[in-house]
Image (tube, grey):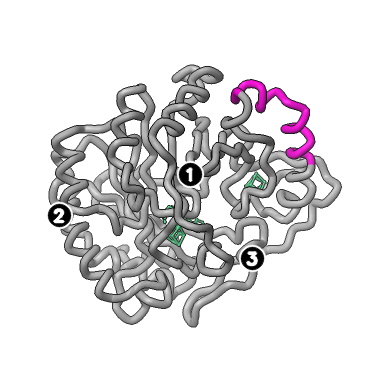
């Protein structure tokens, strides 16, 4: 008989709902999204994230008028059929933005749908009650909870065990109310696929299995075009396979070139792996989005990005 542990050993996703449609975040997107950096700060330092290994930006959040401006710019180029899903998740924790709820309401009012990626630390009773009382257009909630083990917590997330318990009780409040919420929820346990990852996954599963309608998913990691090459904890290490596609014409296997990535100042760039947003082709603060998308500068930066960055990425495809 299959046990949950044997399923995890075979890398089969385990779910406590009957049909499991959850996919790892690193599956190619089949629809176009816009990622908007609503705030720049994160309260965690996950071992598998650039935030733990590079300088972090100073804390800023986007004001509501500029946020509205970006959404209007998106609508001036793409119809709702072409682009309707917005994510905030760069290398930040979106719920730390003091205007997070207002931004949700603005997106809902304009007909956009929000892809809610979060470490779950901001899922307070207040936010959950807000989502029940004022239902928002939320496409999907995916929580990055890479462990619930006291011993591993600090090395995995860079925060205190006290924070883990605070978050656990708040998540229980959230998960107890799934029948009053209008979106699916997945808990993603990121890791390297090793036995240690599988055990961690099962311990998170044990903590949350009593809740109905929550997907639990064992998800893999990428080294983000080698920016995370060689990073590890005492139990897990970043998977790596070397690629050198320099000089080759490349396409993105994740379809990221279909997406739009907006930095906090409205700068537009190509891919979420570009931690420092170095390959920007201008800002919607200066020019209409349509002009930026059609500009020579975009083509020039894209060729540079392909050659310098995608050439080290395992998600690139030679065309
Ligand atoms: C960078 S985080 C920002 C949002 C939020 N702080 C969070 O952790 O969900 C966006 C997504 O990237 C995922 N992620 C972070 N590092 C990753 C890596 N090296 N490989 C694959 N996914 C990763 C997280 O699990 C999360 O779903
Ligand atoms: S993965 Fe998310 S929670 Fe973890 S450090 Fe990065 S941005 Fe923060
Ligand atoms: S670095 Fe390039 S190939 Fe890799 S995910 Fe980003 S856009 Fe795609």
Disc 1: which residue: 37
Q: Quadrant of residue 188?
A: bottom left
Percent position (x, y) of residue 305? 73, 45
Q: Which residues are magenta?
A: 288-303
SS state under label 1: loop
Q: Which secondary structure is most common in the magenta stretch?
A: helix
| 208 sits to left or right of 116 | left
Quadrant, the N terminus: bottom left
- Give the vertical position of 89 relative to 79 (above or below): below
Q: Is residue 183 magenta?
A: no
| 72 sits to left or right of 176 | right
Which-is-in-front pick, marks 3 and 2? 2
Of residues 78 and 82, the one drawn nearer to the viewer in this rendering: 78
- Residue contact at pointers 1 and 3, CB within 8 angstroms: no
- Give the vertical position of 204 relative to 37 (above or below): below
Question: Which of disc 2 and disc 3 is earlier in sequence?
Answer: 2
- Residue 173, label in figure: 2
Quadrant, the C terminus: top right
SS state under label 3: loop
Task: Look at 42% across and 67% down and name the residue there.
Answer: 9
Residue 75 shows in the view? yes
Q: Residues within 10 Å of mark 3 (few under 14, many from 20)?
A: some
Disc 3: which residue: 240
- Residue contact at pointers 2 and 1, CB within 8 angstroms: no
| 203 sits to left or right of 146 | left
- Give the vertical position of 55 relative to 64 (above or below): below
Question: Which of disc 3 and disc 1 is earlier in sequence?
Answer: 1
């Amino acid at each position: 008989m299959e046990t949950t542990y044997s399923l995890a050993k075979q890398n089969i996703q385990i779910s406590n709902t009957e049909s499991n449609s959850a996919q790892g975040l690193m599956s190619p997107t089949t629809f176009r999204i816009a990622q908007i950096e609503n705030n720049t700060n994160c309260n965690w330092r996950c071992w598998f994230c650039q935030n733990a290994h590079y300088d972090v930006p100073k804390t800023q959040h986007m004001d509501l008028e500029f946020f509205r401006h970006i959404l209007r710019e998106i609508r001036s180029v793409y119809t709702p059929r072409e682009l309707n899903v917005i994510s905030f998740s760069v290398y930040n924790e979106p719920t730390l933005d003091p205007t997070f709820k207002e931004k949700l309401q603005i997106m809902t009012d304009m007909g956009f749908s929000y892809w809610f990626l979060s470490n779950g630390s901001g899922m307070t009773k207040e936010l959950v009650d807000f989502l029940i009382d004022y239902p928002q257009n939320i496409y999907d909630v995916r929580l990055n909870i890479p462990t619930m083990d006291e011993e591993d917590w600090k090395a995995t997330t860079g925060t205190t065990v006290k924070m883990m318990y605070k978050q656990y009780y708040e998540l229980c409040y959230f998960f107890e109310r799934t029948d009053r919420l209008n979106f699916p929820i997945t808990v993603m346990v990121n890791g390297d696929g090793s036995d240690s990852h599988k055990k961690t996954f099962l311990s998170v599963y044990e903590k949350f299995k009593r809740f109905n309608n929550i997907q639990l998913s064992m998800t893999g990691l990428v080294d983000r075009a080698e920016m995370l090459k060689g990073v590890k904890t005492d139990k897990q290490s970043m998977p790596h396979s070397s690629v050198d596609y320099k000089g080759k014409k490349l396409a993105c296997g994740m379809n990221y070139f279909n997406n739009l990535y907006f930095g906090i100042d409205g700068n537009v760039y190509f891919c979420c792996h570009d931690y420092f947003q170095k390959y920007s082709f201008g800002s919607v603060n200066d020019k209409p989005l349509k002009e930026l998308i059609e500009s020579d500068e975009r083509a020039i930066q894209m060729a540079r990005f392909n050659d310098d960055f995608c050439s080290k990425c395992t998600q690139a495809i030679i065309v």
